[in-house]
Image (tube, rainbow, N blue to C red):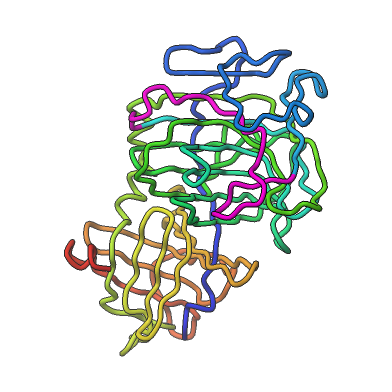
Amino acid sequence: MRLIHALAVLSLFAFPALGADAAGEKNQAGRLFDDFDGKLALDWKQIRPDPTHQSLNKSPGKLTITTQYGSIHRTGRPVLAKNLFLIDIPQPDQDGFAVTTVLEAFRPETLYNQAGLLIYRDDDNYLKFVCEMSGTSGTTLNAILEQSGESVVTNLTIPFEHERLWLRVVKRGKIYECSSSNDGKNFTSTADFTWDDTPRLVGILAKNGGRPDAREIDARFDSFEFRVLTVEEKEDPAQLERLSLSGVWNVVSGELGGKKMTNPAVANITIQPGKFILREKARSVTGSWVIDTARNPKTLTVYLRSGVKLTPLNWAYAIEGDKLTLCTVAKPDAEAPDSLETKEGDTRMLLKLQRAKAEAEDGS
């Protein structure tokens, strides 16, 4: 049974809040905050400003940016996006910070309507994490890392059950974690990226992308926060768990329905921040992944995009040093197994893997 047709993109993992959005706590040491209450409290640098599409009065207590035609995605853009609101990153080489914004009642209506966070070096080197209308997937969270005009995209379908949406990007060294929340307290991690560059600016954007016919809509930003991470936040156990999974893992043995597999289809798996590569004997597929460490056993969800369709494959897993055990029901959208075992007649697949040596990992 092949797994490639079952893989796809999304998962949930709780990340603790990094601080309150209290207007009375503006600009403490290591913290910059703007509540957009009638004026701009931070030293914003506006890239390609357009006063006709921004306002602090249209919705009092919010910064309203009206989306319009323009993009920074990849090279050859006919019109560059306007009204990028950015601030300097204090000490750009520091190894840990978090940026958070709150969107209020943002409802994208047309393909590529979007609003959210931007970590920025220039128009060809940035990370954005936005709420967006994307293809037939409808409303999504869209995380993009672009380097030298080439990008990696992760789209994640989300429900809109609340009026306010918190978006957050956390930087730990070279790893950037994108997460969201409906209450500002309980955050769900949706994507990780590795970025070797040093961004200079952070902030917010709202735009329509590369469609000149897209409808212009208002994006209301209720607040923006930049925070330096504490030592505890830098060493977050869930992040350390994700790092422990990184590497190339060779399949040693497998079981299917309680019976030993004499020749498992899967040869090895590569796990990196933001990337999951499953290799069969003759081909491979690349997806993205997230984990949930609160469950027992812990779960790993992998996503593969087939056109605009996203379908999760849920694994239960255990890691002990250089040994990794994965167990799944080989069926798209199935819940992760509640134990790391297979029994005769069930549809579970169990794989035991061994971490490859560093030399093999470097050459993968």
**Front residue of this view, candidates 226 and 327:** 226
Answer above or below: position of 40 versus 194: above
Residue in view at x 60 percent, y 56 percent? 155
Residue in view at x 41 percent, y 22 percent? 90
Q: Quadrant of the C terminus?
A: bottom left
The question of residue 270 being in magenta is answered with no
Answer above or below: position of 98 versus 312: above
Answer above or below: position of 280 versus 297: below
- Asked if residue 29 lies left or right of residue 188, the reply is left
Residue in view at x 79 percent, y 29 percent? 52
Count all numbered tags in the image, as a single digit: 0
Q: Residue furthest top?
A: 24
Q: Position of residue 185 (x, y in %)?
A: 57, 31
The residue stretch that appears in magenta? 69-95
Residue in view at x 42 percent, y 57 percent? 297
Q: Position of residue 287 (x, y in %)?
A: 48, 65
The question of residue 81 being in magenta is answered with yes
Q: Position of residue 259 (x, y in %)?
A: 37, 86
**Front residue of this view, candidates 44 and 132:** 44
Quadrant housing residue 311: bottom right
- Asked if residue 364 lies left or right of residue 224, the reply is left
What secondary structure is the magenta-colored segment mainly? loop
Answer above or below: position of 169 versus 57: below
Q: Residue furthest bottom?
A: 262
Q: Position of residue 162 (x, y in %)?
A: 74, 39
